Image: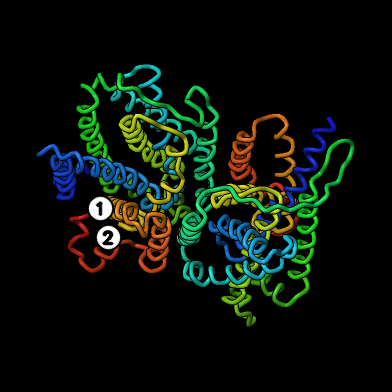
């Protein structure tokens, strides 16, 4: 299976087309509102697709996946504001650094199975958050502010917002492509085998510890970059937002809603949940109930439709299986 | 030196209550292999239950323990049938997610009703003075009540028929079904019991410290640390683990700012999970 096979598959082109439309929609008439909504959607889709690598493929629930997003944000923002780095370079370095840290953390906690692993990921998030809250060079509990000077390298604040949008759409497209590429590769096959029955996979020759560590750190890379870009755009980062466990769980809801293990599912779930969340936050009756509704949704999905929306679609419309993976 | 000793003793007192909270968690885990991620919400329910009972009915705080036990039990049984029942036997991810979903719903409702402000229940109880240090009466009373409840729990599990049924189901569910034990009902009862313990521990914590709706998550994580220290499914280990955690907290608080204690707890949590998956005290008890 070579690279050419990848380009022949229809889904690859669907991802590209989707990302192009995503990027161009607000750009065509400079619609700032749409851009802002799509920035959030791009981030959610990025986070959900990368989380899917662990939950959907390898079957390991990462409850604290937000730690990659937050750490990427902190490293990036620190490099930009305190060290005066170019934002794009900072984002790349943040991604690589978090990827490396994930590899180290992962080697430790990936020995644990199922629920123990899930609890350990919560622990990792909380340790990092507690550490950052006490770490004065990174602003402690008050966080870091970015002054407008930092936006000059991208042509000023207004232009920078558009550049960041396009970069985020690029990161989203890369996440979707990465998920898909992994899914159809030997690595992905190994991960899926691990998800089905880890011991059998190991006995049959799948290098389980290596694959798990690779999946875990791969799932950290793009969210870290997204985190750097997002918090750079917000001009402000603090521990309570960067390592918000509740948001981490909302990403799990997105993956489950759309259909774990499918690339389309992660994107669909992220998109639908973002709409739902936006609507809930604005509506008077439900604004405080956002997490209650999310919880209810999760409960219903787990009890009655664990395959999520794409699970249902793949079951009743079999022709979509190869088209919308 | 005396100050450190006083801090340790106080830590142990508070630790017993953490131990009781963890007993609920470990019981559920041991019996049905479900990690109850709504544990924190149940603790908060206990806290607010105390608040409501003492405010609305002017009930003495320690008298509220009994009604909170009942409320916790009933709530737990309801929770079992709503969220946990369908996930038994399915991959553990499902029960994790469904109990977490319940947690989200309960905490969401809590914040909608009570917001995130600090609540406090005034409990005046004379403390015990010893060499210039006073141990708060509330801490002593809470530790004492915890010991009473722990003994009652032990008696229940060892000597009563439902207790034995719980132990049978946690040992081997299929065998228990074969001898005619109604396992579904036993699972519901075990969940109710675990929830009741969580609830009452919340009530006792509320007599000692102020609380918010969001405090549940930190106590839930403390419960996880204790459960992992004591070995899963081992209520006696949970109590010992709670005391151990209280000891660690008592040792740490004089030397570092309060916010660092949580880092130590979580780091301890990860280390124990990786190095001692069967718990620090598992080698004491022969149970598997």
Q: Position of residue A77 (x, y in %)?
A: 38, 26
Q: Position of residue A10 (x, y in %)?
A: 14, 50
Q: Position of residue B206 (x, y in %)?
A: 67, 53
Chain of the residue under the numbered disc 1 shown in the image: A
**What residue sits right under mark 2 in the picture?**
A310
Position of A235 with respect to B6 (left or right) is left
In this view of the protein, which residue sits in the foreground, B173 or A292? A292
Figure check: A178 above or below A271 = above
Crowd tier of the residue under label 1, counting other residues whose Cα lies within 10 Å: few below 14, some 14–19, many 20 or above = many
**What residue sits right under mark 1 in the picture?**
A264
Figure check: A232 above or below A306 = above
Q: Residue at x 76, y 61 (%)?
A: B150
| Marked residue nearer the N-terminal end (1 or 2) | 1
**Which residue appears farthest toward the right when viewing the image?**
B131
Residue B194 visible at all: no
Q: Position of residue B11 (x, y in %)?
A: 75, 43
Asked where in the image residue A98 lies, by quadrant, the reply is top left
Figure check: B267 above or below B203 = above
Crowd tier of the residue under label 2, counting other residues whose Cα lies within 10 Å: few below 14, some 14–19, many 20 or above = many
């Amino acid at each position: 299976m070579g690279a050419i096979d990848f380009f022949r598959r229809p889904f690859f082109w669907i991802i590209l087309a989707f990302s192009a439309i995503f990027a161009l929609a607000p750009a065509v008439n400079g619609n700032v509102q749409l851009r802002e909504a799509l920035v959030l959607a791009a981030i959610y889709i990025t986070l959900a697709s990368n989380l899917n690598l662990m939950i959907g493929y390898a079957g390991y629930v990462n409850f604290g996946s937000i730690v990659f997003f937050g750490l990427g944000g902190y490293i990036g923002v620190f490099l930009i504001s305190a060290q005066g780095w170019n934002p794009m370079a900072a984002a790349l370095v943040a991604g690589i650094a978090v990827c490396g840290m994930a590899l180290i953390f992962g080697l430790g906690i990936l020995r644990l199975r199922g629920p123990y692993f899930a609890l350990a990921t919560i622990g990792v998030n909380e340790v990092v958050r507690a550490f950052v809250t006490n770490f004065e060079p990174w602003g402690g509990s008050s966080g870091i502010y970015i002054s407008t000077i930092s936006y000059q390298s991208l042509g000023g604040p207004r232009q920078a917002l558009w550049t960041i949008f396009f970069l985020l759409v690029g990161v989203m497209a890369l996440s979707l492509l990465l998920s898909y590429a992994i899914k159809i590769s030997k690595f992905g096959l190994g991960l899926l085998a691990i998800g089905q029955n880890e011991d059998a996979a190991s006995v049959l020759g799948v290098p389980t510890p290596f694959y798990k560590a690779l999946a875990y750190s791969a799932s950290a890379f793009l969210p870290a970059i997204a985190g750097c870009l997002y918090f750079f755009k917000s001009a402000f980062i603090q521990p309570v937002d960067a390592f918000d466990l509740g948001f981490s769980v909302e990403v799990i809801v997105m993956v489950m809603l759309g259909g774990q293990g499918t690339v389309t599912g992660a994107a669909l779930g992220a998109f639908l949940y973002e709409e739902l969340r936006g609507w809930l936050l604005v509506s008077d009756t439900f604004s405080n109930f956002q997490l209650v509704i999310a919880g209810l949704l999760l409960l219903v999905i787990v009890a009655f439709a664990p395959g999520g929306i794409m699970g249902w679609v793949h079951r009743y419309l079999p022709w979509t299986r190869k088209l919308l993976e | 030196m005396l100050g450190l000793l006083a801090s340790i003793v106080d830590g142990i007192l508070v630790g017993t209550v953490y131990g009781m909270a963890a007993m609920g968690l470990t019981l559920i885990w041991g019996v049905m292999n479900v990690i109850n991620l709504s544990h924190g919400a149940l603790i908060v329910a206990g806290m607010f239950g105390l608040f409501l009972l003492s405010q609305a009915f002017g009930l003495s705080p320690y008298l509220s323990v009994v009604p909170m036990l009942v409320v916790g039990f009933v709530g737990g049984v309801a929770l079992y049938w709503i969220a946990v029942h369908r996930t038994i036997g399915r991959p553990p991810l499902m029960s994790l997610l469904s109990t977490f979903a319940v947690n989200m719903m309960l905490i969401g409702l809590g914040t909608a009703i009570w917001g995130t402000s600090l609540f406090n229940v005034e409990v005046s109880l004379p403390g015990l003075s010893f060499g210039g240090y006073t141990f708060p009466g509330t801490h002593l009373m809470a530790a004492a009540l915890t010991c009473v409840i722990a003994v009652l729990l032990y008696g229940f599990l060892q000597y009563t028929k439902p207790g034995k049924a719980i132990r049978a189901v946690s040992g081997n569910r299929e065998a228990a079904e074969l001898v005619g034990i109604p396992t579904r009902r036993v699972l519901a009862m075990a969940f109710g019991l675990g929830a009741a313990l969580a609830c009452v521990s919340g009530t006792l914590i509320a007599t000692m410290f102020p609380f918010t709706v969001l405090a549940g998550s930190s106590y839930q994580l403390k419960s996880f640390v204790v459960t992992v220290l004591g070995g899963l499914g081992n209520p006696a280990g949970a109590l010992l683990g709670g005391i151990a955690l209280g000891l660690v907290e008592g040792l740490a608080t004089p030397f570092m700012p309060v916010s660092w204690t949580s880092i130590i707890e979580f780091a301890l949590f990860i280390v124990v999970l990786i190095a001692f998956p069967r718990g620090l005290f598992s080698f004491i008890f022969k149970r598997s």
